[in-house]
Amino acid sequence: MRKNILIYMAIMVLGSLFFNVSVFSQEDITAVEDSAFDVRQIMRPPVPFFHDEHNEKAGVEECNICHHTYEDGKKVEDDSSEGMECSECHTLEDKSDPAPLVRVYHLQCKGCHEERKAGPVMCGECHIK
């Protein structure tokens, strides 16, 4: 009886450790999402996106390749916007924004896929119903 309790407790501790490690990993990012998009604005479903798996397959090692920052209209090479949503800099509906939110997602993702001749580029290939 005591042996069963110890085994059960060991399983619970290991399960808890596994859960806590996975909660804080980038692997848990499963879709490209931004809080600026609400239900009314989404014309297509969110794009499934497995962050680490994508970057590993694409050979992306530097975060600022995707998580870029600009200063005075010029890209800052050694800076990264990790942890920020794209909508913190790019607006959804401001017509005066030269790089509106939806367009920057398409330029960033689709543009890279076209440049590398790899990855989806058609609407339905990314926005899977």
Image (cartoon, rainbow, N blue to C red):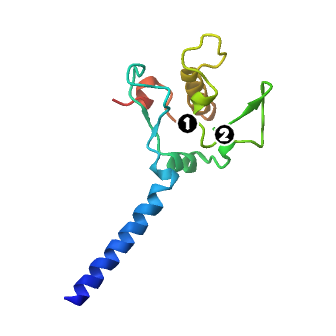
Number of numbered labels in the structure image:
2
The residue that label 2 is drawn on is 81
In the picture, the quarter occupied by the C terminus is top left
Place residue 46 in its image quadrant: top left
Name the residue at 63% across, 31% down: 115
Type of amino acid under label 2:
Ser
In the image, is residue 91 above or below residue 78?
above
Crowding near the residue tagged with mark 1, few <14, some 14–19, many ≥20 C-alpha atoms within 10 Å: few
**Is residue 93 rendered to the left or right of residue 4?**
right
Closest to the camera, between mark 2 and mark 1, is 2
Name the foreground residue: 59 vs 38: 38
Place residue 116 in its image quadrant: top right
Name the residue at 52% across, 36% down: 119
**Is residue 108 rendered to the left or right of residue 8?**
right
Examine the rendering and report whether any part of residue 71 can be seen: yes
Give how far across and how far down residue 61 sits, in percent: 65, 49
Name the foreground residue: 7 vs 2: 2
The residue that label 1 is drawn on is 118
Determine the residue located farthest toward the bottom in the rendered image: 2
The earlier-in-sequence mark between 2 and 1 is 2
Q: Secondary structure at mark 1?
A: loop
